[in-house]
């Protein structure tokens, strides 16, 4: 249901975070390298055939000039989530963030934080969950775990500082 692509194998450690989340909530995905600059024909074919292969959302991670998410978005009507990646040739990641964030009108790319592939996976699962009640239910359980985690830290802090807000 979700295609995860990256511009280079060096992006894999970040992009696996999206795959890990999707796996956790039971959303099928495919993951591969598709470079906008080094394999443009592969990128065009990937984007144009994505819907026919059953994909519903694309997550595209790229560093540096970070053209991959925008170029893919220009070739498909599927939602594209861009993950800016801090790469070795990056300007503190700002070049990647701005390249993905500042898309021209008509070619939107949802953009998550620098190296924010987990959030890209969550957003992709939420998009899939609009029409898939099982995925939506698993996302609700996930969000409950986040709430439980925060409330657990409140309890721990209260033990150390008993004059907290909830007293």
Image: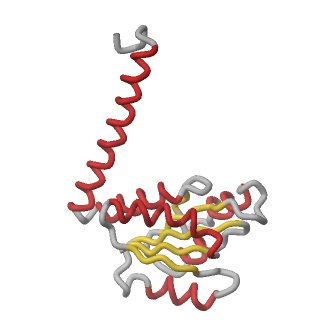
Horizontal and vertical percent position of residue 121: 44, 61
Vertical order, 7 against 90 (above or below) = below
Q: Quadrant of the N terminus?
A: bottom left
* Residue 105 vertical placement versus 113 (above, below): below
Residue at x 27% of width, y 49% of height: 140
Figure quadrant of residue 106: bottom right
Residue 27 is left or right of residue 12, and the answer is left
x and y, in percent, of residue 24 in the image: 34, 60
Number of marks in picture? 0
Q: Residue at x 56, y 87 (%)?
A: 44
Q: Position of residue 55 (x, y in %)?
A: 38, 78
Q: Nearer the viewer, residue 155 or 8?
A: 155
Task: State the image quarter where residue 97 is shown.
Answer: bottom right
Tell me the residue at 39%/82% (across/down): 51
Name the side, left or right, on which 90 lies relative to 28. right
Q: Nearer the viewer, residue 89 or 79?
A: 89
Image quarter (top left, top right, bottom left or bottom right) of the C terminus = top left
Identity of the residue drawn at 41% across and 71% down: 57
Residue 3, horizontal then vertical, whole percent: 44, 75
Answer left or right for 99 relative to 26: right
Which colour assignment does the render follow?
A: secondary structure
């Amino acid at each position: 249901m979700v295609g995860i692509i990256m511009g280079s194998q060096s992006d894999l450690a970040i992009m696996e975070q999206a795959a890990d989340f999707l796996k956790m909530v039971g959303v099928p995905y495919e993951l591969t390298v598709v470079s906008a600059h080094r394999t443009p024909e592969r990128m065009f074919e990937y984007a144009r055939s994505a819907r026919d292969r059953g994909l519903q959302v694309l997550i595209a991670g790229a560093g540096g000039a970070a053209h991959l998410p925008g170029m893919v978005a220009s070739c498909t009507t599927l939602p594209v989530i861009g993950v800016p990646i801090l790469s070795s040739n990056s300007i503190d990641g700002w070049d990647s963030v701005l390249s993905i964030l500042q898309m021209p009108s008509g070619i939107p790319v949802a953009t998550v934080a620098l190296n924010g592939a987990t959030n890209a996976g969550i957003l992709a699962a939420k998009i899939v969950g609009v029409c898939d009640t099982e995925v939506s239910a698993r996302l609700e359980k996930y969000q409950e775990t986040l709430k439980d985690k925060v409330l657990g830290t409140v309890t721990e802090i209260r033990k150390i500082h008993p004059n907290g807000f909830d007293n």
